[in-house]
Amino acid sequence: MEQRKKTYYYDLGEETVRKAKETTPKPKLLLHTCCAVCATVPLEKCAEAFDLTLYFNNSNIYPEREYDRRLNELRRYLTDHYPSVKLIVTPYQHEDYMKDLEEFKDSREGGVRCKICYTKRMKEAYDYAEKHGFDFFSTVMTISRQKNSLVLNQIGEELSESHPKTAYFYSDFKKNGGQDRSIELRNLNGLYQQTYCGCEYSVRDHTEH
Ligand code: SF4
C-alpha cells in the first residue's frame, strides 16, 4: 500500500471545508454524530462552511438511560452554541441492533465487532444522506483516539461507491490538535464525558473515551 502522510485524511478534510466556504449556496452536509464531546470540533470546523445536519443513530449505546444522556447533552450543546444546526434522531432499537454484533462479543475493542458497528451506523446515515439530497456525508467518529481513522475512512470510501449522489467527506478530526481542542471545549462547557464506547461489551471492557 502506498505510504501516506499521517495527516492525509485530515488534509483532505481541510480541503473539503475550504472549497465549501467558497461555494454558494452552502453545500449540504450530513454528519453522523455519536455524542456532544465528539461533535465539538467537527461543529467548529463545519457549521459555517456547510448547511449542516447532524444524524444521531446510535442504537449501539447501552443502557437506554445512557443513550438519553448522550443525546440530551448533544441537544443542549446545539441549543447553546449552534441553534441553526439541524438534528435528526432515529428510534432507539438496541436489541435489534446488537444481533449482528453478538457473535463477536469477545472481539477486542477496535476489532471486527467495532468495524461492523461503525459500518452499520455509517451506512444507515449515508443512505439517508443519499436519499435526501445531501452533497456530503461524514462521521464525527474520527475525533476519537480509540477509533482508527484509516478504518473509518475506508468504510466511508467503500460506501461512497453505492452512494453516487453524496460525496464522502474524508476526515481525521483528532489530528493537528483536534483531540486537545475537544477536551478543552468539553471542559469549558461542562459536557458529560462517557467512560466507555457504547455497547454492553464496552461496559464490560470499560476503557476511557
Ligand atoms: S465497543 Fe463501541 S464501536 Fe465497538 S461494538 Fe461496542 S459500541 Fe460499537
Image: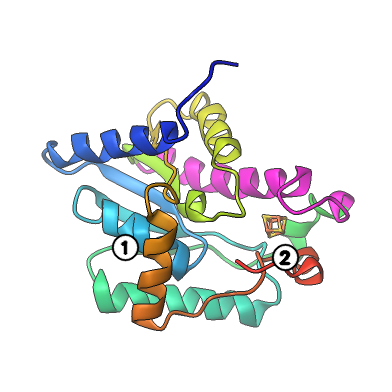
What residue is shown at x 23% (from left), y 48% (from top)? Answer: 50
Which of the two residues, 104 or 132, is positioned nearer the viewer here?
104
Q: How many marks?
A: 2
What residue is shown at x 43% (from left), y 44% (from top)? Answer: 138
Residue 85 as seen in the image, left or right of residue 74: left
Q: Quadrant of the N terminus?
A: top right
Range of residues picked out in magenta? 103-132
In the figure, 182 relative to 142: above or below? below
Residue 35 as seen in the image, left or right of residue 203: left
What residue is shown at x 42% (from left), y 31% (from top)? Answer: 8
Residue that carries the numbered disc 2 in the rendered image: 199
Residue 69 as seen in the image, left or right of residue 20: right
Magenta stretch: dominant secondary structure: helix
Q: Are marks 1 and 2 in contact (CB under 8 Å)?
A: no
Residue type at the position of mark 1: Lys
Whether 128 is among the magenta residues is yes
Viewer-nearest of labels 1 and 2? Answer: 2
Distance from disc 1 to disc 2, alpha carbons, whole Å, reads 26 Å
Kindly give the residue lying farthest to the top in the view shown: 2
Asked if one can make out residue 183 in the rendered structure from this viewpoint, the answer is: yes
Question: 10 Å neighbourhood of mark 1: few (<14), some, or many (≥20)?
Answer: few
In the figure, 100 relative to 180: above or below? above
The image shows residue 45 at horizontal and vertical percentages of: 28, 53
What residue is shown at x 74% (from left), y 70% (from top)? Answer: 206
In the figure, 12 relative to 62: above or below? above
Q: Secondary structure at mark 2?
A: loop
In the figure, 145 relative to 84: above or below? above
The image shows residue 112 at horizontal and vertical percentages of: 77, 43
